[in-house]
Amino acid sequence: MTVQEQQGFRSGWQQRMKALRNVPPVLKIVWHSGGVVVSLGVLFRVFASVLPIALLAVSKLIIDGIVAAITHHQPVPAKFWWIVALEFGLAVLTNVIARIIDYLDSLLADNYTRYVSIEVMRHAAELDLIAYEDPVYYDRLERARVQATDRLGMIQSIGRLIQQVITTISLSASIIYFSPWLLLVLVAGVVPAFLGETHFAFLGYTKNFRQTPVRRQLDYLRLIGGSREAAKELKLFGLSKFFTDRFTVLSDGIHHENVALSRQRLIAGTLLSIISSIGYYAAYVYVIWRTVAGALSIGTLYFLSGAILQASSNIQQIFSTLSGVADQALFLTDLLEFFEMRPAIQSKPGALPAPRPIVQGFEFCNVSFRYPGSSRLILNQLNFTLRPGERVALIGENGEGKTTIVKLMTRLYDPVEGQILLDGTDLREYDLEDLHRQSSVIFQDFMRYEMTAAENIGVGQIQDIQRADLLQLAAAKSHADQVIAKLALGYDQMLGRRFDGGVDLSGGEWQKIALARAYLRDAQLLILDEPTAALDARSEFEVFESFAELTAGKMALFISHRFSTVRTADRIIVLSGGRISEEGDHDALMSRQGRYAEMFELQASSYR
């Protein structure tokens, strides 16, 4: 072994031992998922662990009784049949307890999977939005989601380990009673196999960790290669071979790496298993020799050979299970680190409720923002206000920070410099959930929920999801009622194609549903990011014809590239280089003949 390999081997062992610290917190999660089931599982495993030695002891008595009867040419005594009945009872009890353990394991699996999946979903929802834009976080989240259910085997392994240890202790005690050296021979034969298995299990962990980003690419390629959304371009642009070839190259790399490791494990595992067999048969031959020499009875031969066989098997299983638990614990690192992640954006203790009504509005004071890991400022010393009853439009080239302003205003992000005031108080002083309740936002990339039409609207104000009157009123405001009227089941119609009976909508129809979601929430701040991007000209006119009425008394902030929409705003803000380059109403900006007028004329010329 080279120095580098030795260092890697020691490092692997250190990581395994360190990973065992993951076991207690995971066991705590298991206990929370079903403490009664866990307790019963441990109790029945303790019962099951002492049955093998009991069966061997009873079998020894039966064999010695038969040998004595044959040797002395006498019938077996009456109590002999009670011993046979006892063996039958123990055999039946072994089967019954095994089935009970399987049943309890299945209950625990369901409880744990359900519990930890819910906890992963709940915790993911608590984390900062900016975490979702970090590839490292995505890798961790993906591993955490997998580990949430795939590590169920480790939990069951811990239960088996308890049973194996107790069984081995009872078997080992009987072997030591006859000869302590027999047990030492068995252990010496098993240890090399244990070391080999743990070494390759660790290599498997590091391989899987290394492959996570590539596997995410494979999942993405698999998705776009067979999705309805991508099907049109795949056919028209002839992209199928391009994506298939890319998938093949990436998957071939993973396949070759997996095969190479499996081949090494096969060769090393085979050689080490031979060493284990030598240890077992050395002990077995010694017991036969003592029996032939007359030192042991036939019943004792049966008892010891069975004890040696089972002890050898159990010692191997203990080492293997313990190694498996340690290596499975390595995989749990990301799950536990995921649960340890805490959002930076949260309410302070004693946070203020959002003002009702809002009197002064929002004020950005020298606000700057950049994304983590980037030196580029999206917003640079930005100053602007939004007052109650005012409709403000944000325009600018892509990447100028329009949507970032929305996310800062709703405190999905915090500025890296400066502060955002609401009625003269920093946003960070307000209760976050209450602040969100006063905001109604529809982003350009709004969700298309694969649920009923009523539920698609109702998620905008979840406590009103059963209020048909409010859902219908919101749909009327956004003209989504016209879309729903065409559906066979109306508000009960399942939308999307994911589930049976679902009906898909056009982009504009989905957008009207999303607008209804925004109108359902009676919030003081209404934000629409490209609210009419997917609407045709008539639908856009209908939406904005009622927009002024629907936003009366509210603060309305909208982002749009359509100047027919923008010109209806009370104030238009033009962003450039992370700052405000122009500001005013449509007429004032047109008279300046600046950037706004240039963009307006450029768009208008295409309609002439």
Image (tube, rainbow, N blue to C red):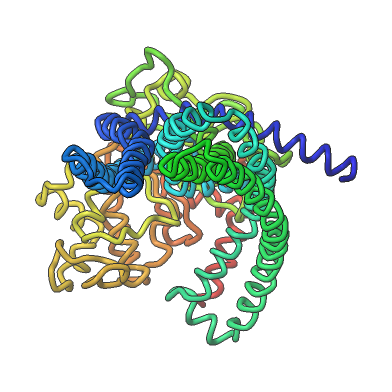
Nearer to me, 489 or 153: 153
Q: Position of residue 106 (x, y in %)?
A: 30, 47
Which quadrant holds residue 380?
top right
Nearer to me, 542 or 184: 184
Q: Decide: is 488 above or below 395.
A: below
Please give left or right for residue 458 compared with residue 268 in the image: left
Q: Position of residue 11 (x, y in %)?
A: 75, 35
Residue at (62%, 36%) from the top-left corner? 187
What count of labels does the image hold?
0
Q: Position of residue 175 (x, y in %)?
A: 51, 32
Nearer to me, 139 or 15: 15
Please give left or right for residue 543 compared with residue 596 in the image: left
Q: Position of residue 560 (x, y in %)?
A: 47, 56
> Extreme top residue here?
350
Q: Decide: is 344 above or below 552.
A: above
Residue at (51%, 46%) from the top-left corner? 309
Nearer to me, 574 or 140: 140
Q: Decide: is 365 above or below 534.
A: above
> Extreme right residue here?
3
Residue at (22%, 65%) from the top-left corner? 494
Residue at (40%, 14%) from the top-left corner? 349
Which quadrant holds the N terminus?
A: top right
Query: Is residue 542 something that shows in the picture?
Result: yes
Query: Is residue 321 something that shows in the picture?
Result: no
